[in-house]
Structure formats: structure tokens, C-alpha cells
Image (spheres, rainbow, N blue to C red):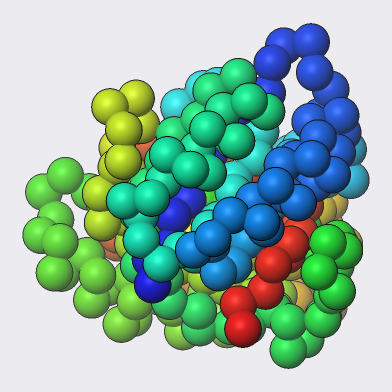
Amino acid sequence: MEKLLYPLWRAPDDSADGFRDSLLQQLGPQLQSVPGIRGIRLCVADSAVAPAAGRIMASNAPLPDAVLSLWVDDSGAAPAWEALIDKRVLRRSAYQVVESEPLRNQAVHPSQPGERVYGMCHVVFFRKPEAMARDQWLQVWQGSHTAVAIETQSTFGYRQNVVVRTLDAHSAYFDAIVEENFPTGAMTSDHEFYGSAGDEELLKQRMAAMMESCIRFIDFDSIDVIPMSEYVLKPLG
């Protein structure tokens, strides 16, 4: 099985919530009927996450308005579902990834298929430092940073997607795409984001520890961070 990630952009005259509804109500059911698609998740920047606008980081504007995750038997069959996607979006990119899931969000805040997942999902696109070897980068990120991220933040879901290849000529280059689930309060509160319960000294310690860890393996000149709402449309069986 393969995991594919599709960043999606809406037309200028389409609202954020209108785009979301089109993807959920029209594209989602169509994709569920396509043979070979085993799982579907949608993250979309809609009005529900508007309070988190201050957490956006944009190095590669315009940022995508949604990210569609598909688990498929064979990526070679992509024309069958990409034709459906293309009818609903202004444009898209496409990546094949290898997913790790250090924290499973459904174990903490379960949701039904098609139901909005609690809180917000930070979708992060980034590249490794240019001079850093890929093996070293993976070791620092997945072998060392993962524990720091879980210990210093209030995340209840954490998915690490290592980009294997881009699937079309128009996709920007990234080494990784991360999906992190945070409580609703984390949209506007640093204490909620870092789980510091109002303790200013603990907040400073956790923010510093997180930043010190991140700068070891992320090129911050190319990072994009996008708060989104998450919907699991077809859970993996």
C-alpha cells in the first residue's frame, strides 16, 4: 500500500468553507467509490481554524487551502482519482510519502467518518538543511526530535510523512510533510499549545527546547505551517 498527499488550491471566487463543503460532500463520496483507494483523510483551512491565523508560516505562497491524503493499492492507477480531484480544485500538487505515526489521534479524540476531528491540525511542509545528509536528517528528526516534540507540546496526534518523490512536474520540492493535532485552545494560547498549564517558566522552557531541537533538522527559510480542520472520510481497515 502507498500513501499519497495532494495539496489543493481553491479558485479565487470560492470561499474557504464552500471549498471544504465541495470536497467533503462531492469529492469525498466519489473517491470512496474508486477501486484501490483504501483510506481517505482531508485537512482543510476553513473558518473553524480562522482563530489560528497567527500560527501560519508562509515561505512558499500561495499556501494550499487543503491537503488530501489517500492510501492506495497502486499509485500507477492515479489517473482514475486525479481526474475527479482536478474537477474540484484550481490546481494541485502530488507527493508519494512514507508515513510514521508516533501518536494516533483516534485513540485520544475519536471521531466518526466524515466528522470534524477535535481541535486543529497543523500541516507543516519543510526541507532539510541543504548541507545535511539525508540519513543524518532522518536520525535527528525521527530518532531524536520526535520525543522532544511529544514532551513539549500538547499534541494528541502526530504523523510524519517522509517524501519519497513528487508525482508531477508542478510540485514544489519538500523533504517532509507533518500533520499534528492540537487542542482547540492551542489556536490562540501558547500555554494550550505547549501544555504548560499557565506556568510561564515551563512555557519558556518548552518553547526553547522545541526551537533548539527544530533548528537541528529544519530549513526555516522554506517552511510552511498551515492550521487546518481534519476529517477522516475513509478510515484504514
Residue placed at 45% from the left, 27% from the top? 60
* 27 on left or right of 81: right
Residue 80 in sight in this render: yes
Residue placed at 73% from the left, 82% from the top? 106
Along the line of sight, the residue nearer the viewer: 33 or 13 = 33
- Return the x and y of residue 5 as percentages of the image width and height: 47, 51
Instruction: Work out which residue is located at the far top of the displayed protein and give it.
Output: 13
* 236 on left or right of 120: left
Q: Is residue 120 above or below residue 210?
A: above
* 54 on left or right of 109: left
Figure quadrant of the N terminus: bottom left
Q: Is residue 232 above or below residue 96?
A: below
- Return the x and y of residue 233 as percentages of the image width and height: 74, 62
- Return the x and y of residue 218 as percentages of the image width and height: 34, 53
Along the line of sight, the residue nearer the viewer: 59 or 9 = 9
Along the line of sight, the residue nearer the viewer: 40 or 13 = 40
Query: Residue 142 appears in which quarter of the rendering?
Result: bottom left
Query: What number of labels is visible?
Result: 0
Query: Residue 177 appears in which quarter of the rendering?
Result: bottom left
